[in-house]
Image (tube, rainbow, N blue to C red):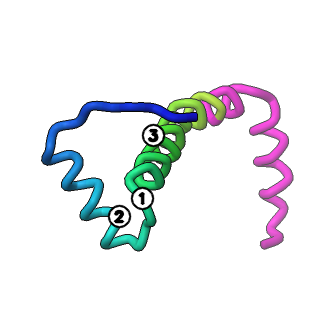
Amino acid sequence: MKLSVSLPEEDVDFLDAYAQSQGIASRSAVLHKAVRLLRAAELGPAYEQAWADWAESEDQDLWDRATADGLS
């Protein structure tokens, strides 16, 4: 899919410099990497919620008993 964006010159310069320093072939590839990183950053709150849900469930007690048997 094609997309046209308007960016300030300094942002375009940054994309070009980043692409060159990282050996990335194009601005599009740099933007694709940025989108993947943004998606990954959004996972943080979801993981926090999942851990909180798990900690409040019976599973944590079961796991704590299983791991407290002295074996490493």
How far apart are the alpha carbons under marks 2 and 1? 6 Å
Quarter location, residue 68: bottom right
Kindly identify the amino acid type of the residue bearing the numbered disc 3: Leu
Kindly identify the amino acid type of the residue bearing the numbered disc 1: Ser
Judging depth in this view, the residue of 58 and 24 nearest the camera is: 24
User: What residue is drawn where x is 38% and y is 53%?
Assistant: 27
Dot 3: element = helix
Q: Point out the image quarter for the N terminus.
A: top right
Kindly identify the amino acid type of the residue bearing the numbered disc 2: Ala
Q: Earlier in the sequence, mark 2 or mark 1?
A: 2
Q: Nearer the viewer, mark 2 or mark 1?
A: 1
User: What residue is drawn where x is 76% and y is 48%?
Assistant: 64
Q: Is residue 49 above or below residue 21?
A: above
User: What residue is drawn where x is 29% and y is 54%?
Assistant: 15
Quarter location, residue 8: top left
Q: Which region is colored magenta?
A: 51-72
Predominant secondary structure, magenta span: helix
Report x, y in % for residue 10: 14, 47
Residue 25 belongs to the span the image colors magenta: no
Q: Earlier in the sequence, mark 1 or mark 3?
A: 1
What residue is disc 1 on?
26
What residue is disc 3 on?
38
Residue 19, labelled with which disc? 2
Dot 2: element = helix
